[in-house]
């Protein structure tokens, strides 16, 4: 058994059920090892209505409009890799269903407090990425943000805030590139050894350059589409259920659900706890939807509500 970043591999390959259990145990173990003095109590926020309104307005202005098939945004892209982890294969051409907007940044803690009324994060700071949340809580955040932003007339009744699909996420991470990272195929500069990754350092936080606590979002360089921290900082939840590979994956950009064996979701991006291979554009892992870690957060999409979609909204 060996590690490639956080990608657990064995020879011969272990059953997917066991792989998921091992990864979950390791992530939970990681979360429990952070120093106790860095953990903040999950307390109610004293934020005022005016402060909440200002944060929602700021959030609404921090999206990048993605228009597939127009200008620099291709209508299709190749998702996955030929030579990466088995879960990244086979690569396939995916057509992006329609326009949407991707948040420039992972959700910061002050925005989470504005919407949810409390901050669960271990490494606290108002513009640090929120962490220590489950996939279920991330979905509730999006639903509540939708209601609040509609009430403030920041978005229309036909728009919503939601998690990106896995295809939307990788499309935006690649930003029109076909290389392992959005800046090229290599993370390590000449002479780099071990955890060092000099070519990646300007773009992503990983275990070779992170200080051990979360920085403010957007502290490093963005990808070609102006999106920050797509490589590293925190793993990011997407909407899709976990599938062990892409053999039966859809060729459009809708979220791929339907795996009834486990309530596990896909996480993307890699994190400040990972070695650089886990920060590749195609890297992915499964995570049960109730699990929390200080290496996992979220990024949002703003998009039109799909016709006929009657999601229950948590107030």
Image (spheres, rainbow, N blue to C red):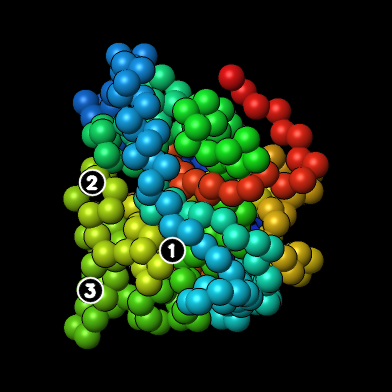
> Which of the two residues, 218 or 3, is positioned nearer the viewer here?
218
State the mark number for residue 196. Answer: none
| Residue corresponding to mark 3 | 198
Tell me the residue at 60%/42% (across/down): 159
184 up-or-down from 260: above or below? below
Q: Residue furthest bottom?
A: 190
List x then y, in percent, for residue 102: 48, 54
Disc 1 is placed on an element classified as helix
Residue sitting at 49 percent across and 46 percent down? 300
The image shows residue 135 at horizontal and vertical percentages of 56, 37
Upstream in sequence: badge 1 or badge 2: 2
111 vs 300, left or right, is left
Question: Horizontal and vertical percent for residue 273?
Answer: 34, 52
Q: Which mark is residue 278?
A: 1
Provide the residue designation for mark 2.
215
**Quarter in which the C terminus is drawn:** top right
Displayed quadrant of residue 41: top left
Contact between marks 1 and 2 (CB within 8 A): the answer is no
Q: Residue 169 lies in what quarter of the image?
A: bottom right
90 to 263, vertically: above or below: below
């Amino acid at each position: 058994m060996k590690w490639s970043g956080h990608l657990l591999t064995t020879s011969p390959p272990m059953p997917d059920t066991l792989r998921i259990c091992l990864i979950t145990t390791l992530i939970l173990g990681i979360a429990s090892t952070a120093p106790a003095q860095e953990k903040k109590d999950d307390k109610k926020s004293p934020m005022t209505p005016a402060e909440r309104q200002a944060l929602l307005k700021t959030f609404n202005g921090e999206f990048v409009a993605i228009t597939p098939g127009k200008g620099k945004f291709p209508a299709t892209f190749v998702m996955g890799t030929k030579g990466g982890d088995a879960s990244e294969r086979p690569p396939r051409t995916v057509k992006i269903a329609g326009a949407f907007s991707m948040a420039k940044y992972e959700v910061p803690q002050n925005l989470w407090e504005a919407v949810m009324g409390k901050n669960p994060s271990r490494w606290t700071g108002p513009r640090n990425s929120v962490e220590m949340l489950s996939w279920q809580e991330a979905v509730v955040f999006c639903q509540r943000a939708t209601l609040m932003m509609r009430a403030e007339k920041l978005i229309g009744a036909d728009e919503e805030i939601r998690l990106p699909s896995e295809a939307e996420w990788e499309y935006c991470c690649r930003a029109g590139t076909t290389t392992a990272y959005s800046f090229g195929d290599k993370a390590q500069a000449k002479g780099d050894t071990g955890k060092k990754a000099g070519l990646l350092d300007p773009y992503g936080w990983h275990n070779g350059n992170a200080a051990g606590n979360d920085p403010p979002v957007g502290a490093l360089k963005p990808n070609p589409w102006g999106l920050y921290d797509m490589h590293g900082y925190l793993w990011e939840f997407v909407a899709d259920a976990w599938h062990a590979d892409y053999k039966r994956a859809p060729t459009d950009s809708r979220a791929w659900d339907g795996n009834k064996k486990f309530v596990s979701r896909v996480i993307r991006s890699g994190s400040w706890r990972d070695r650089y291979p886990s920060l590749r554009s195609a890297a992915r892992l499964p995570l049960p939807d109730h699990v929390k870690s200080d290496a996992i957060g979220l990024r949002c999409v703003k998009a039109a509500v799909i016709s006929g979609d009657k999601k229950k909204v948590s107030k």
